[in-house]
Image (cartoon, rainbow, N blue to C red):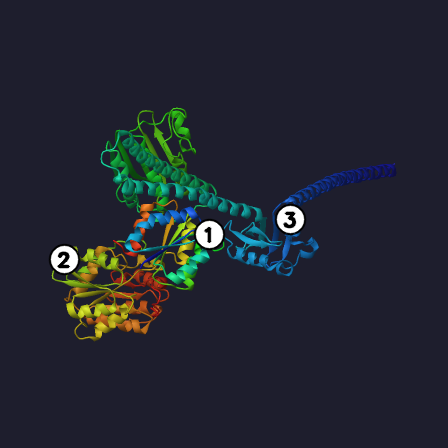
Amino acid sequence: MAKVLIVDDEAHIAQLIEQTLEDLEDEGVELLVARNGEEALVLIEREKPELVYLDIMMPKMNGFEVCRTVKREWQLEGITIVMLTAKGQEVDRKKGEEVGADRYMTKPFDPDALYQNALEVLGLE
Amino acid sequence: MADLQRLQRRFERERRARKSAEKIAEDKTRQLFETNRELSGLTADLERRRATLRETLSYLTTIIDNMADCLLVTDTEQRVKLVNRALLQVYGLEQEDVLGRKVDEVFPVAIQQLLAEGSAGSGRENVQFEIELPGQRVGMAMVDPIAAADEGDGQPLGFVTLIRDFTTAKEIDRMKTDFISNVSHELRTPLTSILGFTKIIKRKLLKNIFPTLSAELPPKLNKAVRQVEGNLDIIIAEGERLTKLINDVLDVAKMEAGKVEWHMAPLEVDELVTRVLAATAGLFAASPQVELVREVEPNLPRLIGDVDRLMQVLINLISNAVKFTDVGSVRVRVRREGEQAIFSVTDTGMGIAEEGLQSVFDKFKQVGDTLTDKPKGTGLGLPISKQIVEHHGGHIWVESRLGEGATFSFSLPLEASSEPASAVPPRIDTEHLMQHLSGRGPSEGIGRSVLVVDDEPHIREYLRQELEPAGYTVYEAANGLEAVSRAKELRPQLIILDVMMPTMNGFDAAAVLKNDPQTLNIPIMIHSIVEDRVRGCRIGIDRYLTKPSETDVLLSEVASLTSQGGARKHILVVERDRQTTRILTQSLEASGDAVVEVSTGADCVNRALALKPDMIVIDANVAGHQEIVQQIRAEEAMRNVALILLAEREPSAQPGEADGE
């Protein structure tokens, strides 16, 4: 059972992504939501999702730290991390590379593009 | 009576003498007066000059002491010669504490480091360093050498250091960065929800809800359905427009704040235009009555620039052109003018009135009456394009007349020297030598095969492209090991061998080949990159193999080596390293030529004269090889000897290769 984790402290955005991906549930994918960095790490460790949508700007622990922990410290494999940002700064891209982010999406993103991206990563058609 | 006369005469004489003495006295007195007056004049002058000097000194001191920046003047031994009040204040010191003392005795170590860095880089101007200042502050410092007014020995007399408190400026800079990123986030987040949810609503309505409605709907409901769908499209379109506006505004803000990261790299103009036209294909597809015309001058040298940003400029100009043209064409043209490339986009649209031309690159200005002409777009595209072009050192301008279309053009400087990285050797007439050394016929290559060995695929490709048209069959190998096995398998007439290769380098491969009975008779040509320092040798060198080689030269070399006819050739090898010498010797001897080896440079010129070889092979590692070449060339008898230079790539090009080659 493939799992996708959505991490965003803004309720609307988390909901938006969930709705965008809900058709995946028909393909047997489980959608999980975390509202902050700490919750995200707990869920990642327990559930080992194949795909994680990770917002960057979050209080207390931001997306970069989560990504660094998962990719560099824990060195978990088989998890694709897509960083989401509204900042649109190139320096973020570099930072993303440093912490091991796999992909990068700037808000506002196109829901269809997000969906296609998820299908691709999960290997579903 | 006679006495009286004598007395009178004497009296007269004495009178005259006295007069004369008086006159002398008078003269002397007058001279004295003159001198005195001069002296007074000089003294007064001196006083005046002293006063001026004092004034000037006091003036300069006032300036120096009132300078906001800290001033430190040091001599070549890092002793403090001059300071100003600002410096003393910042460091909490008194003048008498520091004058004449060494910098490291009285100032924090940061200053000494600054001087060390600054004096090391002297020669370069206006280099700034960041330095910590006491009290948690930050400064920007400049260190400049004091040069002697006359020639001197080029050494500075000391250094002048200026330090400016940069703390506030740095803070403001950081605030700008934060502001831009915060605004960006604040604007984009709600927009993400608006656009995102609207698209989902549309999808759900069209996929899940509308289909459930019966095929035949009462007119009112029908209308409602169509409206709902239409309204959603409007929201989405406007949301996307808002997104573009935010992006543009942030772009402008970033550029003004100097916060844009530029990724400058060499790029090909042709490729740039192709990518841009691919990106704007949709615009042309949507406006079938507007034709695209592409005119890019061939063989344009490369540019240095940020490819994404330059694409942004061209795309902006082209989309404007399409936007303002109903029927006609948009011509994209690139031509070279001197050291610049001129890009222009010409449309046959409505054109721009003269009043509008001035402000076309202003922010938020859109042509037309603000009351009647609604803006189509953000009005920021051109100002952003202007910033980008100007950052690259170019200019952007427009030519237009109302009703007659418009041409937007921009210039970009071309890459300074667009010659290939390694210089191409000059063409030198070696025909005499060629005839002497080879039995070359017009179709020299027919029936002959060459094995090209180089780890770089494009070099192998290059050699293939040069040799095949002359009729040679070209085989390839990518390293020494492969070379050996293919050589055994194919038995080519010649092996062209690169020296620096992974796994097994050229010299080792040559050794192996020469020791194997199956391959020891195959001539080997060593092929390498000529370093810059070797350029000086060029005057004396007839042929040498460089990357990329010069075709004729290469072919001649190859022809001469694959021909088996002719008397034994005498070749003089000038090489320092014994092993290299041995390998070269073996390779050359295998083709039936005699070899004499020489190690040192001094010796070789004499031996050359004695031996009169047909060919001299010099390794660039030999010290003074340039002089050797020149000496040999200067000899009349040596004029027609072929000089071959054996040189390597720079060590940094091949990490891991440490053969002492």
Is residue B394 shown to the viewer in this render? Answer: no
Left or right: A66 as drawn, with respect to B438: right
Q: Is residue B379 above or below residue B604?
A: above
Label 1 belongs to which residue? A58
* Quadrant occupied by the N terminus of chain B: top right
Residue B652 appears anywhere in the view: yes
Observer-side mark, 3 or 1, equals 1
- C-alpha distance separating marks 2 and 3: 79 Å
> Which residue is rendered at x = 12% and y = 57% of the image?
B443
Find residue B491 and report its horizontal and vertical position in percent: 15, 68
Q: Chain of mark 2?
A: B
Distance of label 3 from label 1 (alpha carbons): 45 Å
| Mark 2–mark 3 CB contact (< 8 Å) | no
**In the image: residue A41, left or right of residue B574:** right
Q: Under tag 3, what secondary structure?
A: helix
Q: Classify residue B647 by image quadrant.
A: bottom left
Whichever of labels 2 and 3 marks the residue nearer the N terminus, that label is 3
Q: Chain of mark 1?
A: A
Same chain, labels 2 and 3: yes
Residue to which mark 2 is pinned: B471
Q: Residues within 10 Å of mark 1 (few under 14, many from 20)?
A: some
